[in-house]
Image: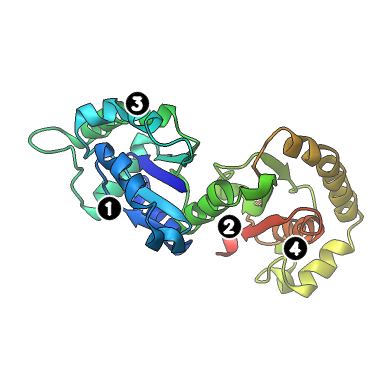
């Protein structure tokens, strides 16, 4: 049986993660007391739970303080046949404060006179034991809901069978480099279709933009250089037990050049790796 534990500070996206796992076929429980994990594992060994891919539970700071302190011991007490993975979500304090301000929700620890900033810091301390043992830690400060769901699918769920999962992503530098990027390729040296009036409102997926870029000698030279690097080193990443890799390709606005090259790389590597995903951040 597979058990996925989702934890993290309030406002970091735990509900989104739990919903994603539910969509992927997991039996999901929100706000489970840590002390009940052994009972849950025993319960899910029943025949009717065979329909589910596994169990996913959300454990957060609403738990009893002593139970959170005993988290590691409780996990170690689970049967040896249980495959346990821990996803810990977090974000910068400023991002969490902004999210609570926008939604006007009350932080679960901000009862009484405790200010929001202090509650957020206190929550970090309470969850430290879980964060330390996490299989995967994601910083959601700059992630949209869709990007978080994609990251969970790629980095947490797309790692079975011992094969490496690839995400090839286009982006615009004006919005910042993706927080989860492992390799970043800057393609802003290529001629920019934005300055061609007829192409400005199109994207790198449109035939006229692709034709414009393919007419530029720099385009194929850059593509060949990127492929040469990836062809040389991706097998080494995979052999080092790396289960996922995010390759980010950026131009100024994330509309033309990066979209074209990311799509071209995707078409190339989907023939070599069983799990390759493509995302165009600025087109979503």
Q: Which mark is residue 102?
A: 1
Label located before the other in sequence (4 or 2):
4
Q: Are marks 4 and 1 in contact (CB under 8 Å)?
A: no
Q: What is the C-alpha distance between the residues marked 4 and 1?
A: 37 Å
Between disc 1 and disc 3, the foreground one is: 3
Q: Which mark is residue 193?
A: 4
- For label 4, the crowd category at 10 Å Cα-Cα, with few meaning under 14, some 14 to 19 and many 20 or more, is many
Q: Residue furthest left?
A: 112
Q: What is the C-alpha distance between the residues marked 4 and 2?
A: 18 Å
Q: What is the C-alpha distance between the residues marked 2 and 1?
A: 23 Å
Between disc 3 and disc 4, the foreground one is: 3
Q: Nearer the viewer, residue 219 or 45?
A: 45
Q: Secondary structure at mark 4?
A: helix
Q: Secondary structure at mark 2?
A: helix
Name the image quarter holding the C terminus: bottom right
Q: Label 3 belongs to which residue?
A: 73
Q: Are marks 4 and 2 in contact (CB under 8 Å)?
A: no
Question: Viewed as shown, does residue 207 lie left or right of 201?
Answer: right
Q: What is the C-alpha distance between the residues marked 3 and 2?
A: 41 Å
Label located before the other in sequence (3 or 2):
3
Question: Viewed as shown, does residue 137 lie left or right of 212?
Answer: left
Between disc 3 and disc 2, the foreground one is: 3
Label located before the other in sequence (3 or 4):
3
Label located before the other in sequence (1 or 3):
3
Q: Label 2 belongs to which residue?
A: 281
Residue 130 at what x, y percent from top left? Answer: 37, 31
Confirm whether residue 247 shows in the render.
no
Q: Is residue 47 above or below residue 61?
A: below
Model colouring = rainbow
């Amino acid at each position: 049986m597979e058990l996925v534990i989702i934890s993290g500070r309030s406002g970091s996206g735990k509900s989104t993660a739990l919903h994603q796992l539910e969509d992927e076929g997991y039996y999901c429980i929100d706000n489970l007391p840590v002390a009940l994990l052994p009972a849950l594992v025993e319960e899910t060994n029943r025949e009717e739970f065979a329909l589910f891919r596994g169990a996913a539970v959300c454990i957060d700071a609403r738990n009893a303080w002593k139970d959170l302190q005993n988290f590691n011991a409780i996990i170690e007490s689970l049967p040896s046949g249980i495959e346990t993975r821990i996803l810990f979500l977090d974000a910068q304090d400023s991002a969490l404060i902004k999210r609570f301000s926008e939604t006007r929700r009350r932080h679960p620890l901000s009862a009484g006179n405790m200010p929001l900033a202090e509650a957020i810091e206190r929550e970090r301390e309470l969850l430290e034991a879980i964060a330390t043992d996490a299989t995967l830690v994601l910083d959601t400060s700059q992630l949209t809901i869709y990007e978080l769901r994609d990251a969970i699918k790629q980095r947490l769920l797309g790692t079975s069978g011992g094969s490496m999962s690839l995400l090839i992503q286009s982006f615009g530098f004006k919005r910042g480099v993706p927080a989860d990027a492992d390799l970043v390729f800057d393609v802003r040296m290529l001629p920019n279709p934005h300055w061609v009036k007829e192409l400005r409102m199109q994207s790198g997926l449109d035939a006229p933009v692709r034709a414009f870029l393919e007419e530029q000698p720099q385009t194929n030279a850059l593509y060949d250089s990127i492929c040469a690097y990836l062809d040389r080193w991706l097998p080494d990443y995979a052999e080092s037990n790396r289960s996922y890799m995010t390759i980010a390709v950026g131009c100024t606005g994330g509309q033309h050049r990066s979209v074209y090259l990311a799509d071209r790389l995707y078409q190339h590597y989907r023939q070599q790796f069983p799990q390759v995903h493509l995302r165009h951040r600025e087109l979503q």
